[in-house]
């Protein structure tokens, strides 16, 4: 009876030892896996931090290098765009290295992205169109940083051209951000794209005044301004026969940077010159058209008279 009992005890001890050895192996394997993951995670974090610093350093180095190139030196639009592309490329390369260190197979990711390219393209078509439009704007060069442009009724000075947007600053120093796709698709007016710009001001004089004298007064006044260019010479001409006045238009050419203030000067100077020459600048008035047998008479603008109808003339 003792022999079978001893055999059972021996088998139980052997089974316990085997179980303990298996558990020890599993624990050792899990410990090794956890250690390897901790090491890989630490290295991945270090790669990510280095990627951030490398992207900034590469962008700074690209800016310093490209600024020495003649084609980029005087064109901040292309310079900022190229620097941003360098920053994005370095960041993408770093993120691929991080994923590989964590054990993610980048080939699998590429395969998945390739299979889902249609869905991704549809979901990101707005963003991708902005990137494509930014590249087209860089190639076509309808404006540069510092130009004053009008895009879809929004005017401002171009501050920067990014991969996705164009940033403007208007006269009130408001920041305006426009998607590149809208800039490329909408009508765009570059107000400072040329070296010179024309000023056009419409004056009105009375029908009884000497039109040739009025034209000469305005032309001489514009020619005397130090910011007005003499070639082409200031031009004046009758451009409209209005209800109560004759329209005389003044054209004067100035440099782009002098346009705004010179226009204000010529508008004030034209008014003062016409007053000094005794030429009337008429204002709209109203005439009372009576009912019945009453004679028509001029009335003060804004006055009301019973039983009368007013007609602008």
Image (cartoon, rainbow, N blue to C red):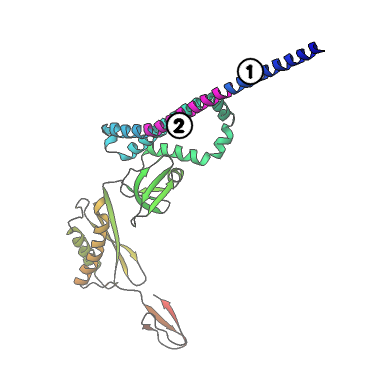
Between residue 290 and residue 109, name the one nearer to us.
Answer: 109
Asked if residue 304 is positioned above or below residue 118 in the image, the reply reads below
Mark number displayed over residue 310: none
Mark number displayed over residue 21: 1
Q: How far is the residue under mark 1 from the one under mark 2? A: 36 Å
Q: In which quarter of the image is residue 211?
A: bottom left
Viewer-nearest of discs 1 and 2: 1
Between residue 223 and residue 237, name the one nearer to us.
Answer: 223
* Extreme residue toward the front, this view: 2
Residue in view at x 44 percent, y 39 percent: 133
Using residue 312 as the reference point, say whether residue 120 is left or right of it. Answer: right
Residue 34 in view of the camera: yes
- Name the spot of residue 251 as percent of width and height, x first: 27, 57
- Name the spot of residue 17 as percent of width and height, x first: 67, 17
Report helix, strand or loop for mark 2: helix
Task: Report the magenta residues as a range.
Answer: 29-54
- Name the spot of residue 124 as percent of width and height, x first: 53, 39
**Which residue is tagged 2?**
45
Between residue 217 and residue 189, name the one nearer to us.
Answer: 189
CB under 8 Å between callouts 1 and 2? no
């Amino acid at each position: 009876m003792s022999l079978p009992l001893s055999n059972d005890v021996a088998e139980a001890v052997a089974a316990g030892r085997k179980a303990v050895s298996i558990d020890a192996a599993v624990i050792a394997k899990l410990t090794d896996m956890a250690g390897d993951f901790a090491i890989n995670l630490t290295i991945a974090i270090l790669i990510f931090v280095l990627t951030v610093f490398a992207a900034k350093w590469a962008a700074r180095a690209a800016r310093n290098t490209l600024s020495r190139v003649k084609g980029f030196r005087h064109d901040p639009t292309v310079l900022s765009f190229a620097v941003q592309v360098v920053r994005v490329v370095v960041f993408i390369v770093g993120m691929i290295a991080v994923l590989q260190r964590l054990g993610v197979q980048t080939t699998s990711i590429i395969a998945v992205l390739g299979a889902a390219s249609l869905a991704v393209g549809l979901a990101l078509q707005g963003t991708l169109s902005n990137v494509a439009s930014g590249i087209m704007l860089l190639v076509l060069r309808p404006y540069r940083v510092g130009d004053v442009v009008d895009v879809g009724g929004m005017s401002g000075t171009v501050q920067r051209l990014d991969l996705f947007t164009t940033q403007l600053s208007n006269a009130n120093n408001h920041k305006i951000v426009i998607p590149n796709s809208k800039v490329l698709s909408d009508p765009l007016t570059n107000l400072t794209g040329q070296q010179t710009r024309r000023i056009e001001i419409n004056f009105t004089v009375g029908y009884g005044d000497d039109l040739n004298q009025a034209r000469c007064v305005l032309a001489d006044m514009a020619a005397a301004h130090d910011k007005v260019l003499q070639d082409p010479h200031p031009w004046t001409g009758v451009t409209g026969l209005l209800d109560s006045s004759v329209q005389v238009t003044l054209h004067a050419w100035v440099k782009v940077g002098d346009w705004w203030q010179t226009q204000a000067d010529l508008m004030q100077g034209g008014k003062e010159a016409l007053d000094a020459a005794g030429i009337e600048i008429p204002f709209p008035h109203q005439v009372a058209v009576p009912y019945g047998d009453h004679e028509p008479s001029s009335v003060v603008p804004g006055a009301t008279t019973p039983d009368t109808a007013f007609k602008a003339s």
